[in-house]
Image (tube, rainbow, N blue to C red):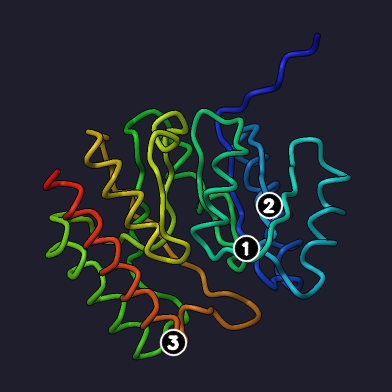
Amino acid sequence: MTATPTFPLTIVVPAYNEEALLAPTIRGLRSALAALQLRAEIVIVDDGSRDATGAIADELASRDSDLVAVHQANQGLGGALRTGIAAARGDYVLTRPADMPVEADDLAPFTARLGAADVLVRVRSRRAGYGPLMQLNSWIYPRIVAVLFGLRLRDVNWIHLYRTSLIRRVTLTQRGIPMLVEALVRLRDLGATFVEVPSEMKPRTAGVASASRIKVMVRTLRGLLQFWGAWRAGRKL
């Protein structure tokens, strides 16, 4: 009986309507991993895309034995990350947007620190491609998180790396962007250790980030407050 292969790292790539960027992102990931001499599993989660994203994911998986394509009905970022984490075979799991170019220097801060903490939190020195509204939102959001949860991290809403065995002990309830904060808060409450990893953010080369839409910002704040209410109630039990 052949044992299920394991990896030092699984990279989860949630993808929703990213037909123009998914293949270049995966090529960039593979090139970066090769330059770092690290074997890693890639899990693409097609989150109910309505374009050719799912077909592209399947084609990529057919040519790469260390790449898995998972399809699901649209469940938002939170649902896609839950699915990817459940499928991961790596000791650590790293989340990575499908809409962002990647080079070896983007992954090196994480791979160099594997094992340094239970959670590595990537900190952007600037927000590439952000307009004034998104810049304001990105300044306010971690401050709201600090007030509500006492979680004082500089960048709570981007790329995180988790110890797989620990993140699987957490029940994640949020579907959308607030799931990222929910994961950090619940891991903190479990006693997880954190290290912030400074790095640069590259602008996307096609399409528009969904987080730039007012309705997404409002939905994110509503979800964050919903999670805060549930978290407070749980602490009182």
On the rendered structure, is 190 left or right of 54? Answer: left
Tag nearer the camera, 1 or 3: 3
Q: Is 214 or 199 nearer to us in this picture?
A: 214
**Which of the labelled discs sits on residue 44, or is there none?**
2
Indicate the amino acid at tag 1.
Answer: Ala
| Badge 2: residue crowd in 10 Å (few <14, some 14–19, many ≥20) | many
Label 2 near label 3: C-beta < 8 Å? Answer: no
Relative image position of residue 91 (x, y in whole percent): 51, 28
What residue sits right under mark 1 in the picture?
98
* Kind of element beneath mark 3: helix
Q: Amino acid at mark 3?
A: Lys
- Residue at 62%, 63% in the rendered image: 98
| x then y, percent, for residue 231 | 22, 53
For residue 78, above or below residue 140: above
The location of residue 173, given as percent across then percent down, is 41, 54
Contact between marks 1 and 2 (CB within 8 A): the answer is yes
Where's residue 204, x and y in %?
58, 74
Q: Secondary structure at mark 2?
A: strand
Q: Is residue 41 left or right of residue 212?
A: right
**Residue count near mark 3 (Cα–Cα under 10 Å), binned few <14, some 14–19, many ≥20:** few
Question: Residue visible at 31% across and 75% down?
Answer: 221
Front of the two marks 3 and 2: 3
Which quadrant holds the N terminus?
top right
For the C terminus, the image quarter is top left
Mark 1 or mark 2, which is nearer to you? 2
Distance of label 1 from label 2 (alpha carbons): 9 Å
The amino acid pointed to by label 2 is: Ile
Badge 3 is on which residue? 215
The image quadrant of residue 180 is bottom left
In the image, what residue occupies the spot 70% across and 59% down? 46
